[in-house]
Image: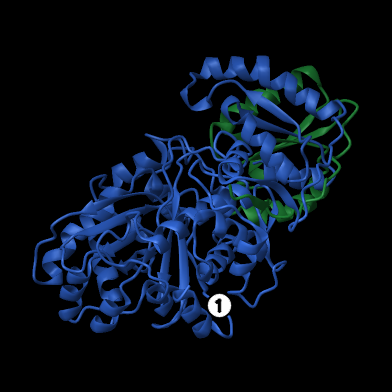
Chain colours: A blue, B green
């Protein structure tokens, strides 16, 4: 919304932005990142979604309206530029505890101890890339800071990563900078978190866990790389709790995940990164933002047909309001993820099913009643104003015909518009019959995958790192 | 006790300070456009603002949010890229943009 105001100001048209009371701090910091710290905001008391029509009207007339007029006809205060340190400038010298205190008090750490980012430590990281330290993958909103290789190394040091993880960290940040991912939405109120998936031989080379407890902390590569992403969102994109990170609840970062490449090879299945054009054996990182997840425990059956109902039930139940990314807010961008333990995936593959076959079967079964789908869009929420029916969306060509095959409110409709939109990864305890499902945040964290670029002398450097 | 000389963890700014558009002398006789992200009751709030502004400035006119499409979601990038052109085309003097909630 502020981005629209900024575009209007750039076009020479004065603006007033309507912002609910609880979001004024976010608006102020976002405006700084847009280069317009003096962007004019008109407050709306409380939150509009809980106000009766007469209360809303009174608030708008008594509070919002005068500010709108003032914003459009009165001169705005001058904006003041604040200088930042140069990248190699030492900003502080002190003990481990003093460094940690400084970083915490300035909002540069997450509250856990950080590894002090000395120039020597950063340069050791930089030895694992052929890219220049000043190379930028692009600006990251809301702060609009350049995602430089140097800043990746600094935050990698702080997160407790090993220097040789740098190529993976760079691929993650390249993904963040991809406009398709939508990093600017990382502070939205549902408070979703990004899951990193590592594919290719690099996962084993760097010691990523892909077996039992794959989503649990306790494995340096998985844990520190996951922490890195959250620190990077904080320090470079600029998502700070109580300011631009407006997660109503939120949670700690997700540890990075690796797929079980050995199991995939045995089954003849492609990795998750194949959805983005990568071949088996390619080193790649996928990032995608998920609103929540849940385990599907003790799947029972010796054939895919016996398993698919329960797995599809998990996919259908994990979603809810997120279906506004299937139809409504950003149609066709909902990408739920199913994690299969190797023993489940191998049983399915043994019957001759490919990943595509499984996706199709899941899509056919992962369905909910039409009335319930409509309630998520515009009855229980007001995320899609107008309380339109699924038939309306089909008639407007904003939904496929499968959503209006009859007028029966109890008819079952799919949770995503295409079978291909269901992501599948094989990981977790190899011999336990559990699966895991993630609900997806649609275009507010759309899946992107990037190649992990290794330096020319990667093997030698890796061998040296192992002996360190 | 070991000491550490540390560097700043943030990235360089890419956005330079941008001067805001000049403000208007009055809304009288001006054309005000509404931009909406199609969230949080803008469809109820903009009509209230329109009614109240018109009562205070009888010569003010309005461009509805439907002229532009949603400023959030799937159409955001295209809608924002097209704003300057649309403002010229529609002779827009001022904008009220919502809803940040």
The residue depicted at 38 percent of the width and 35 percent of the height is A379
The residue depicted at 49 percent of the width and 84 percent of the height is A459
Vertical placement of residue A291 versus A198, above or below: above
Asked whether residue B73 appears in the rendered view, the answer is no
Question: In the rendered structure, the residue with mark 1 lies on which chain?
Answer: A
Image position of A389 (left or right of A17): left
Vertical placement of residue A327 versus A9, above or below: below
* Count of all numbered marks drawn on residues in the image: 1
Asked whether residue A430 appears in the rendered view, the answer is yes
Residue A262, given in percent of the width and then of the height, sits at 29, 79
Residue A200, given in percent of the width and then of the height, sits at 41, 78
Residue A252, given in percent of the width and then of the height, sits at 42, 45
Q: Residue furthest right?
A: B25
Snapshot quadrant of residue A348: bottom left
Q: Secondary structure at mark 1?
A: loop
* Mark 1 surroundings within 10 Å by alpha-carbon count, few (fewer than 14), some (14 through 19), many (20 or more): some
Residue A468, given in percent of the width and then of the height, sits at 48, 72
Quadrant in the picture for the N terminus of chain A: top right
> Circle 1 sits on which residue?
A453
Pick the front one: A103 or B54: A103
Vertical placement of residue A154 versus A164, above or below: above
The residue depicted at 30 percent of the width and 75 percent of the height is A356
Image position of A410 (left or right of A319): left
């Amino acid at each position: 919304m502020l981005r629209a105001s900024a575009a209007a100001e750039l076009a020479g048209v004065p603006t007033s932005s309507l912002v609910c009371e609880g979001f004024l701090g976010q608006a102020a910091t976002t405006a700084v990142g847009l280069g317009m710290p003096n962007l004019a905001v008109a407050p709306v008391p409380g939150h509009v979604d809980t106000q009766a029509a007469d209360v809303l009207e009174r608030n708008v007339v008594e509070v919002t309206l005068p500010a709108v007029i003032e914003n459009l006809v009165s001169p705005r205060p001058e904006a003041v530029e604040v200088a930042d340190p140069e990248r190699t400038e030492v900003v502080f010298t002190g003990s481990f505890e003093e460094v940690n205190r400084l970083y915490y008090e300035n909002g540069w750490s997450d509250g856990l101890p950080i590894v002090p980012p000395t120039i020597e430590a950063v340069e050791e990281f930089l030895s694992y890339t052929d890219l220049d330290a000043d190379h930028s993958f692009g600006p990251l909103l809301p702060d609009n800071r350049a995602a430089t290789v140097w800043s990746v190394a600094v935050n990698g040091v702080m997160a407790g990563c090993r220097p040789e993880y740098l190529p993976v960290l760079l691929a993650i940040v390249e993904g963040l900078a991809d406009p398709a991912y939508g990093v600017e939405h990382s502070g939205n109120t549902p408070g979703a978190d990004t899951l990193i998936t590592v594919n290719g031989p690099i996962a084993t080379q760097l010691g990523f866990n892909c077996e039992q407890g794959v989503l649990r902390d306790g494995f340096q590569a998985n844990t520190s790389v996951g922490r890195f992403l959250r620190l990077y969102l904080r320090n470079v994109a600029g998502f700070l709790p109580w300011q631009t990170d407006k997660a109503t609840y939120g949670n700690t970062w997700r540890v990075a995940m690796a797929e079980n490449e050995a199991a995939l090879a045995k089954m003849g299945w492609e990795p998750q990164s194949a959805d983005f054009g990568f071949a088996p054996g390619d080193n790649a990182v996928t990032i995608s933002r998920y609103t929540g997840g849940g385990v599907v425990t003790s799947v029972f059956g010796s054939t895919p047909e016996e398993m698919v109902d329960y797995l599809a039930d998990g996919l259908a139940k994990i979603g809810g309001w997120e279906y506004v990314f299937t139809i409504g807010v950003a149609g066709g961008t909902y990408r739920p993820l199913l994690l299969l333990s190797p023993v489940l995936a191998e049983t399915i593959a043994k019957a001759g099913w490919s990943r595509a076959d499984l996706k199709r079967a899941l899509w056919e079964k992962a369905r909910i009643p039409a009335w319930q789908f409509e309630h998520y869009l515009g009855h229980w929420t007001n995320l899609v104003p107008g309380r339109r029916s699924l038939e309306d969306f089909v008639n407007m060509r904003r939904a496929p015909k499968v959503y209006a095959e009859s007028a029966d409110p109890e008819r079952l409709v799919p949770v995503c518009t295409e079978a291909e939109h269901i992501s599948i990864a094989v990981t977790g305890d190899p011999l336990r019959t559990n699966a895991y499902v993630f609900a997806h945040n649609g275009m507010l964290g759309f899946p992107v995958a990037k190649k992990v670029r290794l330096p020319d002398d990667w093997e030698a450097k890796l061998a040296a790192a192992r002996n360190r | 006790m070991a000491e550490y000389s540390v560097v700043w963890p943030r990235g360089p700014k890419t956005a330079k300070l941008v001067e805001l558009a000049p403000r208007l002398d009055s809304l009288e006789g001006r054309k005000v456009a509404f931009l909406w992200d199609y969230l949080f009751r803008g469809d109820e709030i903009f009509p209230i603002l329109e009614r109240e502004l018109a009562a205070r400035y009888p010569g003010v006119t309005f461009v509805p949010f439907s002229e532009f499409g949603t400023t959030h979601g799937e159409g955001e990038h295209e809608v924002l890229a097209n704003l300057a052109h649309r403002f010229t085309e529609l002779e827009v003097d001022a904008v009220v943009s919502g809803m940040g909630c």
